Image (tube, rainbow, N blue to C red):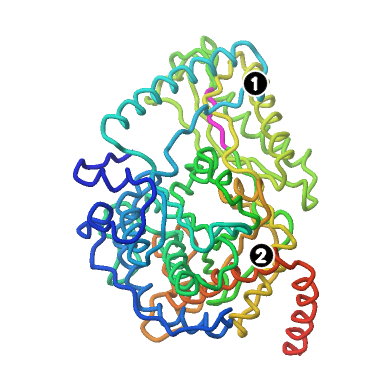
Amino acid sequence: MLLLRRSSRSLYLSALCAAGAVAALTPRAAAGAPISTPDLPPCGSPPTPSCLLQQAAALQDWGVNIRRQLHRHPELMYEEERTSALVQEVLTELGIKYTSGWGRDRRSSLVDESLLESSTERGDAEELQELQQQQQQQQRRQQEKTGVIGTGIVGEIGTGEAPCILLRADMDALPIHEQADVAFKSEVDGKMHACGHDSHTTMLLMAAAILKKNEASIKGTVRLVFQPAEEGGQGARMMLEEGLLERNPRPSFALGLHVSPELPTGIFASREGPLMAATGSFHFEIVGVGGHGAMPFQTHDPITACASAVQNINSFVARENDYSANSSGFVSVTQIQAGSAFNVIPSECTLKGTIRAFSNEKLRELQLRLRQVVQRTAEAFRCSLRVRSLYTNTPTLRVHPKALAVFKQAVSAVLPSSRVEGMEPTYGGEDFSFVLDKLPGVFAFIGIGSGGQKAGHVPTSFGLHHPRFALDEEVLHLGAAAEAQFAFDAIRHLLDPQAQEEKLPQQEQKKHEEDL
């Protein structure tokens, strides 16, 4: 983890920060150009969807400025200090109360002991966990010494009473060297916002500005969550363990958005039920007896065992997997490492990879069988298995049907030319699933793919995590409008669910007639 400079440490020690505490909270040198919110056209009470869209459009240039500042200065998981400073500056400028210091890195064991079988494996796991605990203690002592705490932020708008709606954006970047031909490309070698988290953060800040402007019309509470460490760091889980959902009022619905180059700009996609896979990872070492390459009969060759293990993994997945929607899954071996000389058979061979499934139960089944197959293959070649890591990264992400219905209603109202398309589940993982495991909510993709069709615009068709990934920034005000409208509609639904449910079929029928 990147450690804070002492001069900026006070930024992260605030408990509850209201507007006006700018000097202690927002060092402008860290955030880049000053952030000044434009005046928004007034709306009635409650605000109409068309007025919310007008306000979002008025924020477009402001949002582009914020997004480009974030894009120039990408930060990896648990290092989002500058990003957090900028978010806090904007929230303070908007007069939004917030707490900081959320999402400290407290990842524990890399081995789920319930997936182990033999005493040797358990001994290896205990040794690994003891080492990791020592590292964590050292990390905590260093954090206490330097004042470093989490970079996550939680803001609130509204009455402070139920019903409560949670809106979430992730903030971290990726260890990728940017190749996109844009004037505001990453200024940090080997780091890039190649998954659009800079736009997610910006859209939520824009939605926050809209909601704050219309705060008198909010008959409940909107909780804004700016989350660190989505890219494999389980930042959402860290914030949950710190009590994100235990604060009063407890959220009743949650929404997270993610940009997608596979969709036209401003078009959404989601589905009821499992949307994204449960994910796991593994790191095995097959341990044998090394020796001279000319005398393999004197060795217990771990490379041969490793090669057979890969074949057996592929075979058991293919033969035992039911490819129905809720039961499918797979295992991919992505790294094999062994040896350092052409004439030496090594004593160890390393296997690493990922596991994906559309149910938590299927993921666990694959984890158990994977360990069993690799262990018995190793034993067949007179080798042993050492489990270095075997654990779940994220649970299955499931979309709640009522929350999705409210989201579709919101998109239809505020963006009449847009729609929420259906989609097939994806084997990608997303740690917002930790939140949706605890409360009803929606995760939806919003398209950015039309930007490349504009004259002079860089291509926006490159996939997520690609070094030439680029964004159609027109998406910023569209996503912000959808988030703000969802907050209002979800609160209305929770206050009067019967009236809202009667309204939904009418809107669906109207949309169908327009499509015809």
Q: Secondary structure at mark 2?
A: loop
**Mark 2 closeness class: few <14, some 14–19, many ≥20 residues within 10 Å:** many
Between 299 and 123, the residue placed more toward the observer is: 123
As drawn, the label of residue 270 is: 2
Q: Do the CB atoms of the residues marked 2 and 1 lie less than 8 Å apart?
A: no
Tell me the amino acid under the disc marked 1.
Answer: Leu
Q: As rendered, which of 172 and 499 lies closer to the eye?
A: 499
Q: State the residue at coordinates (52%, 66%).
A: 259
Q: Which residue is mark 1?
A: 116
Name which residue type carries label 2. Answer: Ser
For the residue pair 321 and 421, the one nearer the viewer reads as: 421
Can residue 412 be found in the magenta stretch?
Answer: no
At a point 42% along the width and 25% down the height, the residue shown is 339
SS at mark 1?
loop
Q: Which residues are magenta?
A: 281-285
Instruction: Mark 2 or mark 1: name the one nearer the start of the chain.
Output: 1
* Side of 185 relative to 207 (left or right): left
